[in-house]
Image (tube, rainbow, N blue to C red):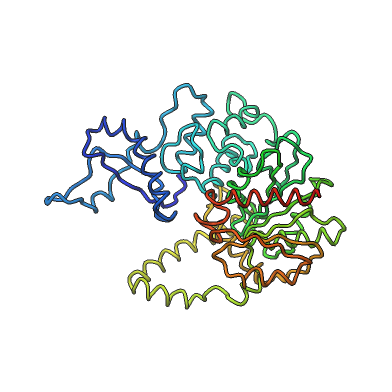
Amino acid sequence: STGTKRLVAHVSLHEMDTAAAKTAASETRQAINDAVRSTLPPTMRPQRIAVHASLPRTPHGKLDRGAAALLDVPVEIGDGSTPTAGASPLENEIAALFSSEIGHPVGIDDDFFASGGNSLAALTVAVAIEDRFGEPFPVTKLIDAPTARATAALLAPHVTSTGKSVITSIGSDELPEGELLAVLRAGTEHDDAAVVLVAPGTGHLMVYQPLATALAPHLDVFGLSLPGADGKRPPLRTVGAIAEEMLAELTLLGDRPIVLLGGSSGGLIAWELAVRLERQGRPVAGLILQDTLHPQAWRDNPPPTRAEQYRALLDERGVFGTLFETFERGRRKIGHMRAERAMAAGGAPDGPVDPEAISHHLVMATDEMTAAYFPEPLANSVRLFAASNTDPALTIDRWSPLTAELRVDHLEGDHHGDDGIGSPKRVGVAARLVEDEIGRAKR
């Protein structure tokens, strides 16, 4: 629906007839999704699975891959358009929106993220909800309401029978939100320190969904997204400028104690926020860097130049592969240029800015801000979640001289990705350590 390329898996169920294939399609897709999530990296996982009665064969009985690549994805199997019996019209509409974006049917009680949704898909869904209902819907709301039923329940009080908004904002009755500050999860109590998660270079807070879910239910969890993450303005390109806007958003929390956590490059912004709050006489209750590399490590190891990238590409893919990739990069660059003009104008006039292009510009801005940032020392202690597969010379050795005490927790896993220390399978350890930091702040 967004024009984004997707990897499609075409499946034949032992040459079943069409009716039998339709009956078994949902069960088959779930089994395949479970299998590929445990065996394949994200870039190799199909985003749409089409089940067919049979697949084309060559005269010799082998799979005709050329013909298979031209198969249509059957509407009755692949687009999730069939309403769920007993569901409300709003629930079915949200489920259809989820299905369209993810690329395969999603039931009203299926988790958007577990079904294959990522941060870019979530942004597209949030924008589509805003366009459809005329209701501000921060992308972080999908963390609290990751199923179609839950999202519909969140929207229902604010939407009339005609599908139009009846109020101006959706949010907690007790917790504040702003342009950048969002409630990721409202706790059962509001007297502990607020956990505030600062977005990394991609700009969005979906990466923190596992952590927000794993934290103790009594805690209020907020997120600070990067300026420009909504595609309605260009991204800011210095840590100081970003921190200045985020600092204004934090005033919405009043005098409440704050524990800041920044993952990856988000840790640089969290550090700058802590410096400025300390300078104002309002030190944070805790600062946690989640495997944040010191910017000097980035300056010492800058990304490869364009010439170096092309030499590596030639070695890996040869002349024809390099020519094809050059064409693809040119095509993407045109899209990025269009997105940049749209963001400068306050958004695309004919619809949402391409999420992939937004992410590209945010990452480019993050590279610039990282290279230019020189963090000031902090008087208070800092906690560092150090991934086991990250070189300590890039993190521990660099941050230690800048704080009165650097308390290091060595966590098994990678910097990011499926085996990252913030991934669903490893985030439980980090969640308990965040809770420990909150308890420490109270002592």
Count of picture labels: 0
Q: Where is 190 relative to 159, above or below?
A: below
Q: Which x, y percent locates residue 191? A: 79, 40
Question: Which residue is rendered at x = 81% and y = 50% of the image?
Answer: 443
Q: Nearer the viewer, residue 39 or 52?
A: 39
Q: Nearer the viewer, residue 125 or 85?
A: 85
Q: Residue furthest top?
A: 86
Residue at image coords 32%, 71%: 320
Query: Residue 12 vs residue 181: left or right?
Result: left
Q: Residue at x 59, y 36 (%)?
A: 145
Residue at 36 percent of width and 35 percent of height: 27
- Front residue of 414/360: it is 414
Q: Is residue 132 above or below residue 244?
A: above
Q: Is residue 235 visible?
A: no
Residue 193 in the image: state x and y as whole percent: 77, 46
Q: Position of residue 395 (x, y in %)?
A: 64, 68
Percent x, y of residue 220: 71, 42
**Quadrant for the N terminus in the image:** top left
